[in-house]
């Protein structure tokens, strides 16, 4: 009774979270113990299910498309603020030329890559890309290669000494900074890929 009275007059000032309370309504409620471990254990299955729904359920597909359209739109288009108008025009022309050939696979342009990367983030929770430089292509040697999230193995964990370690395919140095990614050269499940799935070390 006293608790109800104090609560009614606003004198019950105890700090609390409703989700951490008790009572019959919380009987059988499930919790996540060890969030990072749970994510690593279930991320691949969850991402595959999300990808299936994004391709087979019209409601989910429309939601993903709407998110991508609102977040990316026509794409990020930087504009130079160089004081010389001729230099600005030259930079803009080079940018326009590069965006047409930014995709290392040659399937889309830079703005299409942005949309694909965002869709991958929505569906899978993350998106990976690497920069490729072709020395024989001038004056625009840079290209972007989007990676499937499963090319970064979530089950690759290794202690590599001096405090450095690989966790879920991502290499950290002794200070905990990300220094490299260990990726499969081909997408797992690709019928045309080699049978051996050896990882390669990619660094920023």
Image (tube, helix red, strand yellow):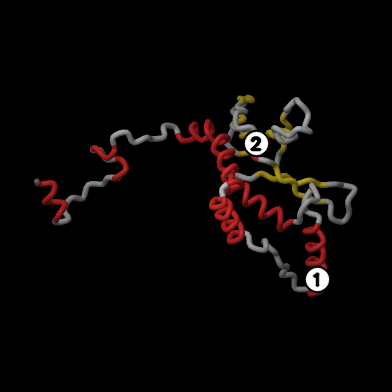
Instruction: Say whether residue 123 is visible.
Output: yes
Q: How many marks?
A: 2
The residue pinned by badge 1 equals 89
The residue pinned by badge 2 equals 150
Residue 3: give x, y in percent of width and height.
13, 46
> Which quadrant of the view contains residue 138?
bottom right
- Give the class, few, some or many, for how many residues have Cα within 10 Å of label 1's Cα (few <14, many ≥20): some
Q: Residue furthest right?
A: 136
Residue at image point 30% right, 40% down: 20
Residue at image point 74% right, 46% down: 145
- Which secondary structure lies at badge 1? helix
Q: Is residue 86 left or right of residue 1?
A: right
**Which label sits on residue 200?**
none
Residue 43: give x, y in percent of width and height.
55, 36
Along the viewing direction, whichever of 127 and 175 lies nearer the viewer: 127
- Give the class, few, some or many, for how many residues have Cα within 10 Å of label 2's Cα (few <14, many ≥20): some
* Of callouts 1 and 2, the N-terminal one: 1
Along the viewing direction, whichever of 63 and 100 lies nearer the viewer: 63
Q: Is residue 156 above or below residue 59?
A: above
């Amino acid at each position: 009774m006293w608790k109800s009275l104090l609560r009614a007059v606003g004198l019950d000032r105890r700090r609390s979270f409703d989700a951490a309370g008790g009572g019959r309504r919380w009987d059988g409620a499930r919790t996540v113990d060890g969030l990072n471990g749970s994510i690593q254990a279930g991320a691949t299955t969850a991402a595959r299910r999300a990808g299936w729904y994004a391709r087979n359920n019209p409601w989910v597909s429309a939601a993903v498309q709407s998110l991508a359209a609102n977040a990316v739109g026509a794409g990020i288009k930087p504009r130079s603020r160089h004081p010389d108008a001729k230099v600005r025009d030259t930079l803009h022309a080079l940018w326009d030329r590069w965006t047409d050939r930014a995709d290392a696979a040659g399937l889309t342009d830079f703005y299409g890559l942005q949309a694909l990367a965002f869709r991958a983030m929505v569906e899978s929770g993350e998106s990976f890309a690497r920069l490729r430089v072709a020395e024989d292509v001038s004056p625009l040697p840079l290209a972007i290669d989007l990676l499937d999230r499963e090319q970064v193995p979530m089950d690759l964990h290794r202690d590599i000494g001096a405090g450095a370690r690989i966790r879920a395919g991502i290499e950290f140095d002794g200070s905990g900074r990300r220094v490299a990614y260990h990726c499969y050269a081909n997408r797992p499940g690709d019928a045309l890929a080699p049978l051996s799935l050896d990882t390669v070390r990619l660094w920023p």
